[in-house]
Amino acid sequence: MEFPDTPTTVSRRCFLGGCAATALATGTALSAGTAAAAESQPCGKLPPGTFLAKKADVPLNGGVVVYFDDETSVVVAQPKKGTYTAFDAKCTHLGCMCSEVDNNLIICWCHDSRFSSVDGKRKTGPAKKPLPQIKTKIKGDDIVVA
Ligand code: FES
């Protein structure tokens, strides 16, 4: 599978109490990550150094869903101030893409499975397995694949 040089769309979700409904539909293009084949990560094997999100774009106790292509999306969350996590957004139930992070829960609306944004473990719903975690590192203001 080839990956685009840049995530083409970001479905940015803001789930803190004060978010306006319009924020739920906001899409924001993010800058480039690198594209190359790599087999060491889940989520379509994003290569190390792939840009995921700006730290400032990931709300505390919430997160963003970064879209790469129809098969590849990554949930980037901030479950604790200054602590960022990332997971393959593909639900371990039947493969829908998780699309929201609310109060530290990653949500798949297909059948309402919810996963912890701390460690990806299933909290409720029909999924049995956790979301695969993607190792990340901070590079300046950015969160990238480690
Ligand atoms: S595919 Fe996610 S809950 Fe069923």
Image (cartoon, grey):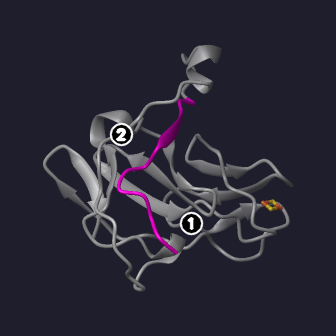
**Which residue lies under the disc numbered 1?**
120
How far from the left and from the top, in percent, is residue 58?
39, 39
Camera sees residue 50? yes
2 up-or-down from 10: above or below:
below
Task: Give the structural element (helix, strand or loop) at label 1.
Answer: loop
Query: Taking the image as four quarters, which one is ligand 1 found in?
Result: bottom right
Q: Which residues are magenta?
A: 1-15
For label 1, count other residues whose C-alpha is less than 10 Å away and answer few (under 14), some (14-19) or many (20+): many
x 38%, y 79%: residue: 37
Q: Is residue 7 above or below residue 44?
A: above
The part of the image, by quadrant, that contains residue 103 is top right
Residue density around tag 2, few if under 14, some if 14–19, many if 20 or more, within 10 Å? some
Q: Amino acid at mark 2?
A: Leu
- Observer-nearest residue: 21 or 37? 37
- The amino acid marked with disc number 1 is Gly
Quick one: which residue is furthest to the left in this view? 140
